[in-house]
Image (tube, grey):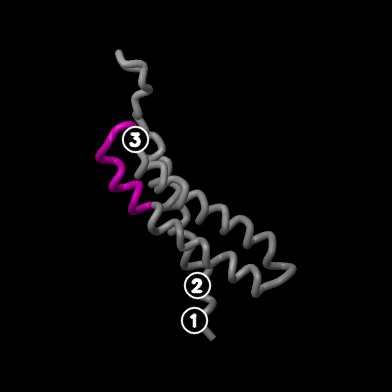
Amino acid sequence: MNRNGNITDRTNWVGLAGFLFALCGLASIAIASFVAPVNASAALAIALLSCASIPGAILSLIAMLWTPRRLAAWGLFLGILGMLYLPTIFLPLIRH
């Protein structure tokens, strides 16, 4: 709190958004792996959400310019981890 009694805002909102996008992308990969044996088309629809890891990584990289950087760093890590899995999902779609 500052002298006036107001709570000071020390949140990196861009880092938080990047972290949530990257977490959503990584969570969709995990959910799609459990749904795939039951319904392949539903798994593909859920796997398309994994593309959210790309803007998550980009937002987190931009958010590394401001403090605090903890969520931005985790968002960058999760976004890169999610992007590494993307070729596994989309390469079988284009190969016959």
Between residue 7 and residue 62, name the one nearer to us.
7
95 sits left or right of 6 in the view: right
Number of other residues with Cα within 10 Å of mark 3, as a class: few under 14, some 14 to 19, many 20 or more: some
In the rendering, at what x and y percent does residue 31 appear?
Answer: 63, 57
Query: Which image quarter is the C terminus in?
Result: bottom right
What residue do we see at 45% from left, 52% from top?
21
Query: What secondary structure is found at the residue carrying circle 2?
Result: helix
User: Which badge, 3 or 1, comes first in the chain's sequence?
Assistant: 3
* Residue 13: percent from left, percent from top: 37, 41
Q: Is residue 96 left or right of residue 55?
A: right
Q: Quadrant of residue 14?
A: top left
Tell me the kind of residue under disc 1.
Ile
Q: Are marks 2 and 1 in contact (CB under 8 Å)?
A: yes
Q: CA distance from mark 3 to mark 1?
A: 38 Å
Tag shown at residue 69? 3
Number of the label disc, if any, that sits on residue 90: 2
Which is nearer the N-term, disc 3 or disc 2?
A: 3
Q: Which mark is residue 34?
A: none
Q: Residue at x 47, y 47 (%)?
A: 20
- Magenta span: 57-69
Give the labeled residue for mark 1.
Answer: 94
Q: Please identify the quarter of the rendering in which residue 64 is found.
A: top left
- Any magenta on residue 63? yes
At 45% from the left and 48% from the top, the residue drawn is 78
